[in-house]
Image: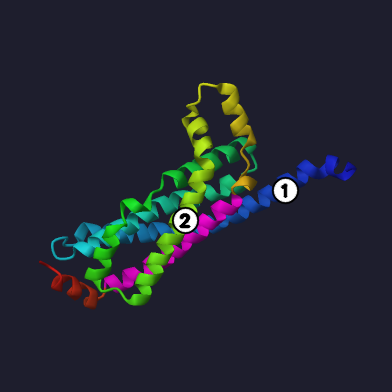
Amino acid sequence: MEFQKRFGKKLKALLLWRLHKKLNKEFQLKDKVINNTILTFVEQMEKINTEYFPASQQFFNLSLYFLLAERDIQALKADAFAHPNETKRGIALRTLLLTIYEWDMTKVTGKKMGFIFDCTGLSAESKKEVSSSLKELRKAHKVTVQQFREIRLNTIAHRDADALNQYKIISRLDIRDFSGQITNFYQASDRLLKSLVIATTEIGSQRSLFNQILHLK
């Protein structure tokens, strides 16, 4: 007990500093990859002939939609999990949870996926992996939304007029209460990213482009 009293805070600060440094290093590598991938999709979308290749355009839009949000949650991860300053850690966590909460992949998937799969002639393996990854991400998203609903309504943008209640909710906010769900979400988004990269290679092939032309009405 005496050791914990004397060194507990210092040890916690040291562990947070080390974890924050580690996560920031991981982010720098991922950020470079994600930004390069975003630029690739933007370039493709700006020059693609949507009349002949509408499925490619929809797939690129889906991928870009995903990547923009993915970049945000990756950028927030280090601070949300381990920023040495408690206030900044709390703000980053609330922002991360809000981003996940508002991130709705159904806006760019749903029936569009059937059209993309049919027209592009994606392999059965790619179809299965993309579909499974999207399902896993939606499941992880649903869990986060259910747990975060009250916090979002009462603390984001400080909407709650009951300041004491708002203070209590913010003060109780702890990454440990969400770490499992957030980690699952990161794993699901990482899996989807990998599946989209593989599918992109297939969709850019001559076989896929020819297949889309054959599907023109």
Comparing 202 with 113, the one in front is: 113
Q: Residue at x 38, y 71 (%)?
A: 128
- List x then y, in percent, for residue 31: 46, 56
Give the quarter of the image for residue 111. Answer: bottom left
Q: Residue at x 29, y 62 (%)?
A: 113
Does residue 96 belong to the magenta stretch?
no
* Amino acid marked by disc 1: Leu
Label 1 and label 2: CA atoms lie apart by: 35 Å
**Where residue 14 is drawn, which disc sits there?**
1
- List x then y, in percent, for residue 123: 32, 76
Residue, disc 2: 139
Left or right, 104 with reference to 49: right
Q: Which residues are magenta?
A: 179-204
| Residue 144 in sight here | yes
- List x then y, in percent, for residue 145: 48, 45
- List x then y, in percent, for residue 207: 22, 78
What secondary structure prevails in the magenta region? helix
Q: Residue at x 64, y 47 (%)?
A: 176
